[in-house]
């Protein structure tokens, strides 16, 4: 097996040595970048000569996934509790940080709460700050850098903990106290073993067929989401992209049953390996990132394709009855496993909560946020002028300018250029909405 290691030089060298020590027969190719934005070019040039790729972080993985078609098996080193514990130990004992007062990036709030509480701290004592993971946005690195600088210069924190080499280098240049999160041995080896098993599974053609049925959830009458036909078409296109991307990862065939339902055919071993035996179904995360929609899914096993299909629909019906944004497996003996989406909420509650987060930060009403979202969906890449946005929202330009100012203050909007709206007069600025 030939494996590429994608990451900054220091991390790649450490990972290379660790893998070679435990897997001497794996041929390793180092793909080194200075900034994570360079990762797609490295992947594009080398993917055809490799069997697997291991990314030393979620950021280069997500950026590459956005621009490059995945033709081989990819995995990234996950953020793990043991990695965070090691970093906090360094921060407390060696760097003498107050670890209750730290600025973080690349970690989720849930993981931080879990690890801090395991150490013995109470949640009411936490005073840390967490950068949003806008991994695929072109201004992500600048956003994270400003986030840490603002927290430090306003004296809110004792130091920063980052998983991004480019951020670490910039903060060190400014003499801002900072620790770089480095991958630990057991996380590296666990990820390599997963890649190895997935590669072996794909090499075996005598695998049982498994059927997955995916259905788009629709909001109920009480949700803030009220869509027109155009909006439904746009969302369906985005969800289709997610489903085909997930299908390529599990080497599956996709059949579009109707305008809200898909059937995916794959093999038992590949699906169980890629999803870590259904502990993490990547499709839920993909849809969550792309669109204000959720999905329900059923996975069916059977001695025949027909039996597997029947069981998949049984699992789907269980997911729908559970309120949506959920999945269930039905095995050939009739046993059921689920729910599968550990982060699930009923789909309309999940979507409204996402909009509420933006509303709470900016002070803009949730209905106005959704109206802006609908308008932006009708424009290329969420990019338009304030005048165009005002017309689409059927609001005054003065009101829209006020909303844009609030969105810009919280990095939900940015100015990307200027263009002439009329034949005469001054050019109007062009904005891009970035909270979708």
Image: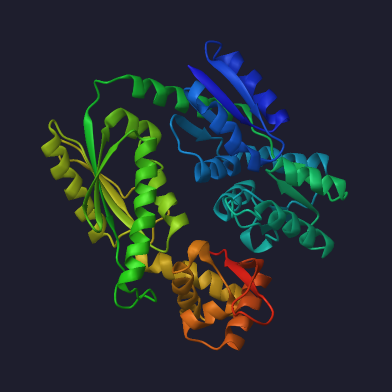
Q: Tell which of 290 and 22 is nearer to you.
A: 290
Q: Which residue is most to the front?
A: 423
Looking at the image, residue 301 lies above or below residue 422: above
- Rendered image quadrant of residue 83: top right
- Rendered image quadrant of residue 364: bottom right
Looking at the image, residue 335 lies above or below residue 54: below
Residue 78 location (% of width, % of height): 55, 39
Q: Tell which of 428 and 142 is nearer to you.
A: 428
Residue 252 location (% of width, % of height): 30, 36
Visual colour scheme: rainbow
Q: Which residue is most to the top?
A: 25
The answer, for residue 101, to whether it is visible in the render is no
Residue 223 location (% of width, % of height): 36, 75
- Please state the total of marks drawn on the protein image: 0
Taking the image as shown, residue 100 lies to the left or right of residue 208, namely: right
- Rendered image quadrant of residue 259: bottom left
The answer, for residue 227, to whether it is visible in the render is yes
Taking the image as shown, residue 311 lies to the left or right of residue 188, namely: left
Residue at 65% in and 57% down: 130
Residue 217 location (% of width, % of height): 30, 62
Residue at 68% in and 82% down: 425
Q: Tell which of 216 and 349 is nearer to you.
A: 216
């Amino acid at each position: 097996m030939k494996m590429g290691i994608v990451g900054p030089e220091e991390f790649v060298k450490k990972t290379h040595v660790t893998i070679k020590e435990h897997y001497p027969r794996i041929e390793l190719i180092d793909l080194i970048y200075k900034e994570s934005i360079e990762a797609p070019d490295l992947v594009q040039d080398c993917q055809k000569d490799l069997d697997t790729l291991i990314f030393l972080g979620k950021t280069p993985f997500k950026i590459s996934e956005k621009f490059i078609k995945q033709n081989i098996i990819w995995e990234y080193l996950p953020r793990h509790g043991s990695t965070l514990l090691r970093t906090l130990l360094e921060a407390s004992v060696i760097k003498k940080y107050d670890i209750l007062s730290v600025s973080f990036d690349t970690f989720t709030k849930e993981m931080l709460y879990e690890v801090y509480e395991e150490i013995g701290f109470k949640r009411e004592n936490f005073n840390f700050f967490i950068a949003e993971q806008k991994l695929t946005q072109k201004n992500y690195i600048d956003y994270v850098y400003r986030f840490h600088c603002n927290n430090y210069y306003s004296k809110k924190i004792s130091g920063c903990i980052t998983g991004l080499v480019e951020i670490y280098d910039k903060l060190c240049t400014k003499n801002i106290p900072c620790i770089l999160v480095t991958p630990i041995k057991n996380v590296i080896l666990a990820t390599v073993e997963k890649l190895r098993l997935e590669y072996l599974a794909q090499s075996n053609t005598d695998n049982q067929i498994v059927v997955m049925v995916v259905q788009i959830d629709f909001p109920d009458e009480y949700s803030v989401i009220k869509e027109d036909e155009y909006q439904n078409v746009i969302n369906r296109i985005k969800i289709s992209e997610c489903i085909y991307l997930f299908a390529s990862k599990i080497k599956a065939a996709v059949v579009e049953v109707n305008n809200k339902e898909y059937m995916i055919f794959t093999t038992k071993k590949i699906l169980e390996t890629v999803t870590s035996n259904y502990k993490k179904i990547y499709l839920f995360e993909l849809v969550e990132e792309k669109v204000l929609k959720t999905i329900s899914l059923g996975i069916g096993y059977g001695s025949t394709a027909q039996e597997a299909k029947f069981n998949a629909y049984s699992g789907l019906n269980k997911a729908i009855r559970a309120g949506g944004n959920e999945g269930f497996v039905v095995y050939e003996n009739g046993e059921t496993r689920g729910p599968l989406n550990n982060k699930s909420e009923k789909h309309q509650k999940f979507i409204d909560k996402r909009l509420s987060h933006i509303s709470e930060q900016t002070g803009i009403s949730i209905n106005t946020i959704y109206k802006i979202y609908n308008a932006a969906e009708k424009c290329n890449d969420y990019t338009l002028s304030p005048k165009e946005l005002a017309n689409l929202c059927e609001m005054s330009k003065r009101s829209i300018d006020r909303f844009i100012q609030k969105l810009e203050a919280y990095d939900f909007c940015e100015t990307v250029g200027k263009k002439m709206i009329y034949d005469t007069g001054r050019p109007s600025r062009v904005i891009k909405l970035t909270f979708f």
